[in-house]
Image (cartoon, helix red, strand yellow):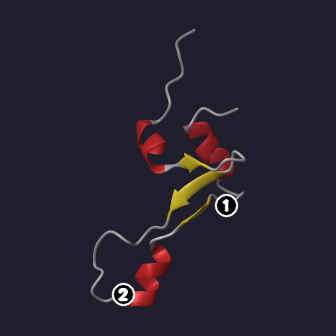
Amino acid sequence: MPKVKTNSGAKKRFSFTGTGKIKRHHAYHSHILTKKTKKQKRNLDHQTLVDRTNLKQVRDLLNLR
């Protein structure tokens, strides 16, 4: 049976906390920033945890079972 490869895009986008939860970056912080307020851009700059509804999808991409 061949080795199951981790999705290369996913391994660049997600990281782990010390307790094993999966962290992600906020979207909408890469371009068209002139129309967004300072507060909006500041809040998008932080990392957050992956929602439980998307956890299975992300774990499948990272080959975590």
Q: Nearer the viewer, residue 41 or 19?
A: 19
Residue 51 badge: 1
Residue at horizontal 50 percent and vertical 69 percent from the top: 46
Residue at horizontal 38 percent and vertical 72 percent from the top: 29
The amino acid pointed to by label 2 is: Lys
> Which quadrant is the C terminus positioned in?
top right
Dividing the picture into quadrants, the one containing residue 4 is top right
Q: In terms of sequence position, does the residue under pointer 1 or pointer 2 come before the other?
A: 2
| 7 lies left or right of 31 | right
The amino acid pointed to by label 1 is: Asp
Residue at horizontal 28 percent and vertical 73 percent from the top: 31
Q: CA distance from mark 1 to mark 2?
A: 24 Å
The residue tagged with tag 2: helix, strand or loop?
A: loop
Residue 36 badge: 2
Residue 6 point in image, percent of width and height: 50, 31
The residue tagged with tag 1: helix, strand or loop?
A: loop
Residue 22 point in image, percent of width and height: 62, 50
